[in-house]
Image: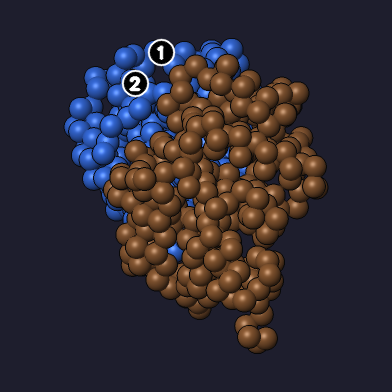
Amino acid sequence: MGQVLDARGLRKAYKRTTAVDGIDLTVAAGERVALLGPNGAGKTTTLLMLLGAILPDEGTVEVLGHPLPKERSEAMGGVGFAAGYLPLPERLKVREVLAVFANLYGIADPGAGISTALERFRIAHLADAMATELSSGQRTLVGIVKATLHRPQLLVLDEPTASLDPDVAEQVRVGVERQCDETGAALLVTSHNMTDVERICERVVFVAAGRVVADGTPDEVMRHFGRGNLEEVFLHLARPEER
Amino acid sequence: MLALDGLRVRAMVRRQYYVQRRSPQRWFDLFIWPMVDTVIWGSIGAYVAQQGGASGSATPYMLSGILLMHVVYQSNVSMATGFMDETWSRNLLNLMVSPLREIELLASLMLTSLVRLFIGLGAVALAAWALYAFDVTSAGPGLIPVVAVLMAVGWAISLVVIGLVLRYGSGAEILTWGILFIVIALSGAFYTTDALPAALRPLSEVLPSTHAFQAARTLLDGDPMPWGQLGIAAIGLVVCIPLAVAFLLRMLHLFRVRGYVTRYN
């Protein structure tokens, strides 16, 4: 299996803190990986470096064989990104938002693709709604549709189910799984919902204080820390004073 | 590296079109504000002429001044606010992780500002003709290169403003208008630069817009195109635009190094 993502020795320090302290991360084609860790562990900074939005102080990133930042545009053509915290552009209808982003990803005539993608996430009825009038769950779903329209080889999701009710979270999980099954896309996801992770991902990478502290299948990681489930591993890492 | 993808540029122009269409307040900038300016400056010109304090050219000078000021205004404000739309709707991260290149975003903003410029100028020209019988075309086709210079000045200012917003965040947005009016004041849009305080004249001389406004007044007087003035303006642009681009690129680099994109998450 070839690698769709290869990051080596990533390091990022801000004025008062070191956010990422030497992270190596690879994702193989079709692989589903969760990047986990407590708040402030460096997950989002890592993701943003992997996507070229933040430049690392040290280290290299290669996405789909394209080195960043030099070939960022080519690399991002094969990547889809959505985050639970990101709003959609204002004053556009859902269908317009999706058409604009489809064009950005090289799809000249996205009409049919948009309808199919909205159906996949069971939100076809939102096509003509204004993007700013959506609930947070609906917005998240539209964000994921936006990220998957161009059938990316790597789908990156940052907290996709944060603050969603169980029903919408289930819609997200099912839609993402179906997308990955149908297109063979690799998945890199951050989440605080360990149920999501155990269900979707075959590999988990735990980070704490900017470093990778465990990397393996959920079972391997649980065994490594001597815990019965990922939730307990998470709590163990989030409370260093109890270790 | 500088290759433009037409589809991506078109996508961003379309995004701007949707914003314009659904933002009634944006039409104020395009129609109302240019007309208000025309009435204010046209009436000042007419009043000065009535008082015998100036020759009959006061009104045309004022009206051509406001028309050309709006070239700088529209090209600057359209481009800068087009970028700021992405910060206001926190869409910057979505764009930064898409294949869109910076040059494509700028190209789309320039195209949008061109359209807005023609609409805004049309509004001023129409108001000047209807209310003060001032026909802007009386200056002849020589006005075209003057407009081109002023448009480029507006774009250069907006590149600096976008750079400042990237570096300092939304607090720097006010400079969109602040820097513009400093340039307008120093450029002598409504007066010859002799009227400026002596200390400010050297500053005025280095601005390309100063020479463009001067060339426009010469044309309005019925004299031939002052190619010397236009040449100085063009040389000024050759210096200013690369400086503005270099500044923007530097700020963009800092934006990525310091992770300022998280301000808009």
Residue that mark 1 sits on: B137
Chain shown in blue? B
Q: Position of residue A212 (x, y in %)?
A: 48, 70
> Which chain appears brown?
A
In the structure shown, which secondary structural element does the residue marked by tag 2 occupy? Answer: helix
Q: Chain of mark 2?
A: B
In the rendered view, tell whether residue B8 sits above or below residue A66.
Answer: above
Residues behind callouts 1 and 2 on a single chain: yes
Q: How many numbered marks are there?
A: 2
Is residue B74 depicted above or below A223 in this figure?
Answer: above
Q: Residues within 10 Å of mark 2 (few under 14, many from 20)?
A: many
Circle 1: element type: helix
* As drawn, A113 above or below B3: above
Horizontal and vertical percent position of residue A56: 38, 63
- Of residue B249 and residue A25, the one placed in the foreground of this image is A25
Instruction: Tell me where residue A97 sits by quadrant.
Output: top right
Out of B258 and B210, give the one closest to the viewer: B258
> Can you tell which quarter of the image residue A239 is in?
bottom right
Which three-letter amino acid code belongs to the residue tagged 2? Answer: Leu
**Can the viewer see residue A28?**
yes
**Residue B143: mark:** 2
Q: Position of residue A222 (x, y in %)?
A: 60, 69
For residue A26, side relative to residue A137 (left or right):
left
Instruction: State the residue at coordinates (58%, 44%).
Output: A82
Amino acid under disc 1: Thr
Q: Chain of mark 1?
A: B
